[in-house]
């Protein structure tokens, strides 16, 4: 089975976000595998262990993304592809186009990815990629079974479960609860250093910057305003209700 995992490197979820000049500062920041993509890596390795085959990790990003890729390789993935061409960096539209070109180049039976990236929360990556490739997709998977060419997925639907049955090839995005990602072992870390990592550019993929140019533009970024201290109202209930209405109207201006 040819298993493809699409992976993004994101800020560590414990990092404090700092905005400088309308941009997020990366100074001194620690980067990790997007947590939802980590579930995808683990599931891919489990599929390989059960059915055989090969796991290829694919990422689009700068050189620093190699550290996240090497972690996935240390977990048990076999090889990786990094598209580190800045002319191919953009929004979800751009990334889907680029990943589709990579998928067609390396081949696949099943594609796994996280249900969203924790830095943007858009949740568009998987569905857009599946659309580009013309294959079915199932999102927010919490259980996955593959039997030959048949695929059975249990997916999270706002606290309930939905069962979807489909066939290969298919793209599936992982939700928390799908598995418990393993920690890379020391031998795995050592082996990861020698596993193949191919770097691809626009020319390698037959893409031009114009055809994958972003469809959206970020005009500004800012942190939410600091919350003020709470206020405790006193007096009888009638007086409190009256004061509350006045505060909501005159200070909060929500009524």
Image: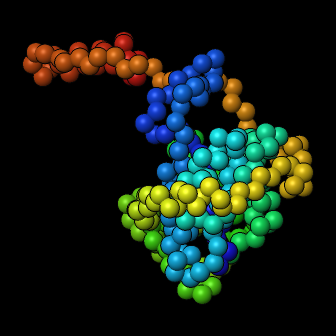
Q: Is residue 173 visible?
A: no
Which percent across, then down, holds residue 5? 62, 62
Q: Residue at x 60, y 53 (%)?
A: 70
Rendered image quadrant of residue 171: bottom right
The N terminus is located in which quarter? Answer: bottom right
Residue closest to the far top: 250
Q: Nearer the viewer, residue 152 or 244?
A: 152
Residue 167's place in the image compared with 170, above or below, is: below
Rendered image quadrant of residue 149: bottom right
Q: Is residue 93 left or right of residue 229?
A: right
Q: Is residue 76 left or right of residue 183?
A: right
Rendered image quadrant of residue 79: bottom right
Q: Residue at x 63, y 21 (%)?
A: 22
Residue 176's place in the image compared with 50, above or below, is: above
Q: Is residue 103 left or right of residue 30?
A: right
Q: Is residue 187 visible?
A: yes
Which percent across, then down, holds residue 200? 80, 52
Q: Nearer the viewer, residue 126 or 60?
A: 60
Q: Residue at x 52, y 81 (%)?
A: 50
Residue closest to the far left: 236
Q: In the rendered view, how is the structure colored?
A: rainbow
Which percent across, then down, holds residue 214? 77, 41
Which percent across, then down, holds residue 235? 10, 15
Report the number of numbered marks: 0
The C terminus is located in which quarter? Answer: top left
Q: Residue at x 63, y 24 (%)?
A: 23
């Amino acid at each position: 089975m040819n298993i493809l995992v699409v992976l993004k490197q994101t800020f560590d979820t414990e990092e404090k976000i700092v905005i400088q000049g309308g941009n997020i500062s990366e100074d001194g920041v620690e980067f990790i595998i997007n947590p939802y993509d980590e579930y995808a890596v683990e599931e891919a390795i489990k599929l390989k262990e059960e059915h055989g085959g090969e796991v290829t990790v694919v990422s689009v990003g700068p050189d620093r993304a190699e550290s996240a890729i090497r972690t996935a390789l240390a977990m048990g993935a076999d090889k990786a592809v990094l598209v580190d061409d800045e002319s191919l960096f953009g929004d979800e539209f751009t990334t889907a186009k680029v990943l589709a070109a990579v998928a067609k180049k390396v081949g696949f039976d099943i594609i796994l990815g996280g249900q969203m990236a924790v830095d943007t929360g858009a949740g568009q990556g998987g569905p857009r990629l599946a659309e580009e490739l013309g294959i079915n997709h199932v999102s927010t998977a919490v259980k996955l079974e593959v039997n030959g060419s048949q695929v059975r997925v249990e997916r999270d639907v706002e606290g309930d479960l939905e069962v979807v049955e489909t066939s290969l090839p298919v793209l599936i995005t992982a939700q928390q609860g799908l598995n418990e990602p393993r920690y890379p072992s020391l031998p795995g870390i050592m082996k990861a250093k020698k596993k193949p990592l191919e770097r691809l550019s626009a020319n390698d993929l037959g893409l031009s910057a114009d055809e994958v140019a972003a469809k959206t533009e970020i005009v500004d970024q800012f942190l939410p305003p600091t919350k003020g201290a709470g206020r405790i109202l006193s007096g009888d209930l009638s007086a409190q209700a009256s004061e509350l209405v006045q505060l909501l109207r005159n200070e909060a201006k929500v009524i």
